[in-house]
Structure formats: structure tokens, C-alpha cells
Amino acid sequence: MTDASRYTSRGHAGLRFFAQRGLMRPFIWSLLSVKVYGTEHLDGVEPPYIVVANHSSHLDAPLLMGALPRKATRYLATGTAADYFYQVRWSRTLTELFFNSFPVERTKVRGRNGMTRQLLNAGVPLLLFPEGTRSMSGEMAAFKPGAAALSISQGVPCVPVAIAGAYDAMPKGASWPKSGRPPVTLNIGRPMSAFPEEDAVDFSDRLAKEVRALTDEAMERRERDDRARGKIN
Ligand SMILES: CCCCCCCCCCCCCCCC(=O)OC[C@@H](O)COP(=O)(O)O
């Protein structure tokens, strides 16, 4: 098992800040028209917590890293597919540099369960995509209950986030966003914890429902704001 020190290192955090805010954010923001709502819901929320978001595009993790408050992304560690990002060295290195990633096993029966617990114990907030794969249609799939189970067992809240528009901007299979700076809207929700007696499956379903509601709200707010600015009639 990897130890957590790389994830809490100040040196790595400094380098990552440059990679994320100096390079990736300006680049992604130049290709898309990004709007972010709900950042105030993270005011005063201390790590560790688990950010859970819908997943339909390779743009998702870069968008989240640029959209969440700086304080939240300093140590935020992204769970990334071991079978996809950890097979070749350059991919692993870049994913670790830009997303502070740790591997999530999708193909083995036994996962690397110790890692997420260890990171949360060290105070590192996590970013997980509970669908476990990118949506093929843009429609959000059911959430696998792992993130909810971790939240319950470790006593840390989940922060639900919706990403709307990333599928249309750059679906699975595309390697570059559509031209014309397509709109992408993120909506950060309030931290949520399981109710007493609520099990991981129920809590997970409730998180998924919240991400859907945040998606609808994101699109409504965006439309209202764009209309107010005279972009839509
Ligand atoms: C020109 C703009 C291009 C920008 C692309 C940057 C690419 C960076 C991708 C970083 C992704 C970080 C990790 C996301 C979490 C994750 O690992 O999800 C799994 C899928 O994703 C891959 O599996 P699948 O959807 O099943 O193909």
C-alpha cells in the first residue's frame, strides 16, 4: 500500500497549484464557457470530506480542480481508474501531478481499500465519481455505494457536485472540446452525511438524487443568468 505522505506533502501541493491553477485552469477555461455556483457551501467546511460528482467527460476532473475553492483543492486527491490511468508511466505521472490521484481498482475482486481510509485519516479530502465510469449517453448512471460507505465508516461528510454540459462539450471518445466555447456549469451542494440508521445504499441513492437536483438547478441558474445578460432571447 502506498503511504499517504505524497498526498500531504507541501512541496507536491505547491507544484500542483502551479499545474492546476497556472496551466490547466486557464487552458480549460479558454476552451469552455464555465460558470460555477454554490462555492459558498464550502465556506467554513474543514477537510476531510468526500466530493462526489457525476462523470461523463475527461473534462470533469479538470473542471472540478479549477472550480472548487483553492482551499479545497490544495490537497484534494482524485480516485482514478487503475486500469485506465495507471498502466503506463507517463499517464500515471501526469494524473498524479494534475489530480493528486490515487488508483481505484475496477477490475480486481480485492480493491485497495486501505488507501482511501488512510488518506481521510491524514486529513486529505477525496474526489470520487461514484458512477465508476463515464456516462455513454450524458445521462447520469446509478451511484455505486462505495463513496457513501466510506463516508459512513469514516464519519466524514460528502459534498455533492453537479457538472452540467461537459458531455455535450466533450463526450467519451472525443479528444478535444467542441469549438465555440460550449457552456459548462458546475453547482456545488451542501455537505451531506448519512442519517442515523441509513445504510450505504440508501445514502448513496440520496447523494445521486441530490446531484441530479443540483444539475437541474445548475441549468436553470445558468439560463437565467445568460438571459439576464442578453445572451438568450
Ligand atoms: C483538450 C482538453 C483535454 C483535457 C483532458 C485532460 C484529461 C485528464 C483526464 C483526467 C481524469 C481524471 C480522472 C477521472 C476519474 C476516472 O478515473 O474516471 C474513469 C474514466 O475517466 C475512465 O474510464 P472510462 O470512463 O470507463 O473509460
Image (tube, helix red, strand yellow):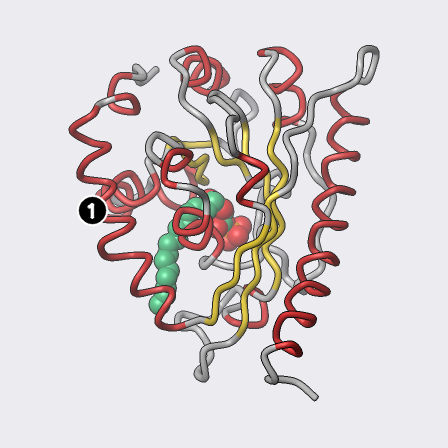
Location of residue 27 in the rendering, given as x and y in whole percent from the top left corner: 30, 65
Expressed as whole percent of the image width and height from the top left, the position of residue 106 reads 53, 35
Around disc 1, counting alpha carbons within 10 Å, would you say few (fewer than 14), some (14 to 19), or many (20 or more)? some
For the image, the number of numbered tags is 1
Q: Give me the residue at 63% from left, 11% from top.
A: 153
Compared to 153, does 48 lie above or below? below
164 lies left or right of 60: right
Q: Position of residue 44 (x, y in %)?
A: 51, 26
Instruction: Check disc 1 and report the residue beneath it.
Output: 18
Residue located at (30% from left, 24% from top):
7
In the rendered image, residue 230, in percent from the top left (x then y), is placed at 61, 84
- Tell me the quadrant of the picture where the C terminus can be found: bottom right
| Left or right: where 171 falls relative to 100 | right
Q: Residue at x 45, y 78 (%)?
A: 181
Of residues 72 and 233, which is closer to you in this image? 233
Q: Is residue 144 left or right of residue 53?
A: right
177 w.r.t. 150: above or below? below
**The residue positioned farthest toward the front in the image shown:** 228
Q: Nearer the viewer, residue 105 or 150?
A: 150
Could you say which quadrant of the image residue 165 lies in? bottom right
